[in-house]
Amino acid sequence: MKRQTPLIISLVFICAVSAAAQVPANRPWWYTLERGKNLYRDGDYGNALLAFEDARRERRAMYGRMEQDFISLLSVAEVRRLGDSLDRVERYAGERSYTAAAAALEELHYRIPRESFNNSVAAALSALGRLKDYPEAEYWIGETYRAEGELTLALDQFRKAWEQRALFENQGFATELLYKIAGIYKTIPLQNPQNGQYNQRAYNEMERTLLLIIEGDTLWSASAPAGQRAPEETVPYAEASASFTRRAMTRTLEQEGAVRFLTMYRYNNTEVEQAHRLLGFYYSLSGRHSRAQEHLMFAFLIQNTVIIEELIRREYDFTFTNLETLTGEIGRSPILSAYADKADYYKTAYYLAAALYGNGKAAARELWAFLASRSEAGEWQNRAAAQLGPGGPRLERLVEMP
């Protein structure tokens, strides 16, 4: 018998009517969204979904009315003769008491800077139409589907929210959305039951999404692999300088090892750390050691910068000397221990060493020796010790996404 999910059950009409009856009348769309978030946090996914859909419908209805009010004003013969001048149309609405249209324009200017319309009526009307979209509601509908295991439905909603991302009230939320999309591509079953091969399309989409996240990272984008950047002489000075720094970082890591590398450099762009880390793991899976090294170098540097800066915040004269001492400090702090677990600290160090070894760099041994000495590294201690044991290091044949 086919299992019916709670979401499908919750979508029947009688439940919708029942839930709607419990909602106070005349609540704004943003209030409905917040109510849905509370229901979601309580695990009441069925009613949360209904609330998010209500919020989307309420916003669309409100801005739809405003759009029609503005169109009604523009249909007046005298207004048509004013042409595409937004200032003149607004003035007319105020002087002739077209209050609904004036209110619509006031709301529009609250949401979108006035100067972006270039005094164009057509641009204002188009923007007012776009305000009917509600990317936060689309996101939370997708998040509810994701929590219920409906990954295909969740992905569709997240894509819709991404298409509407210009309307996010918090633009930084777009990055979180991309991580959700990448996570679904990583989570979707990746093996074809017919031939046992990985679904490369899912991995490709995950890669593309993660690359979007690091696109705005100036230190990375200025120093992207050959073929993905303009010749250095054509890029601005700041980008050329970042590219030089990145090459110097790579030389230091490869030639002088991780301790010297972490002594010389700091980088605290935490927003891109996970993207670099997952890309590094993915390139390790596919045997692209150079690309894996590039991304894991960034991820490991950001992780250690976060840890070192936190230790300096607690003890201003703390100085990084070696990884063994640093990880001893991690072990004494529940907050840093939790961060190391969340950021896959030891796993990142292991695969960075593997990438270095795959590129023929002796610096791999230093990282493996460090891991082999740390019991808190768990699995990665054992695997590092095996790399340093009889028979010497070897390239691993990975069979799944790390």
Image (cartoon, rainbow, N blue to C red):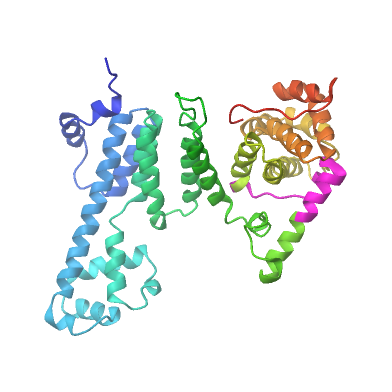
x 32%, y 39%: residue? 35
Name the outermost residue toward the left. Answer: 77
Query: Which of the two residues, 388 or 214, is positioned nearer the viewer here?
Result: 388
51 magenta-colored? no
Query: Which of the two residues, 19 or 284, is positioned nearer the viewer here?
Result: 284
* Position of 100 relative to 23 (above/below): below
The quadrant of the rendering that contains the N terminus is top left
Q: Position of residue 241 (x, y in %)?
A: 74, 64
x 49%, y 30%: residue? 190
261 magenta-colored? yes
x 51%, y 25%: residue? 196
Count the marks.
Answer: 0
SS assignment for the magenta stretch, majority? helix
x 17%, y 66%: residue? 69
* Position of 27 relative to 332 (above/below): below
- Please say whether residue 2 is visible from this viewpoint: yes
Name the outermost residue toward the top. Answer: 1
Q: Position of residue 305 (x, y in %)?
A: 72, 44
Magenta residues, as a range? 247-271
Query: Which of the two residues, 157 or 89, is positioned nearer the viewer here?
Result: 157
Left or right placement of residue 97 versus residue 341 in this view: left
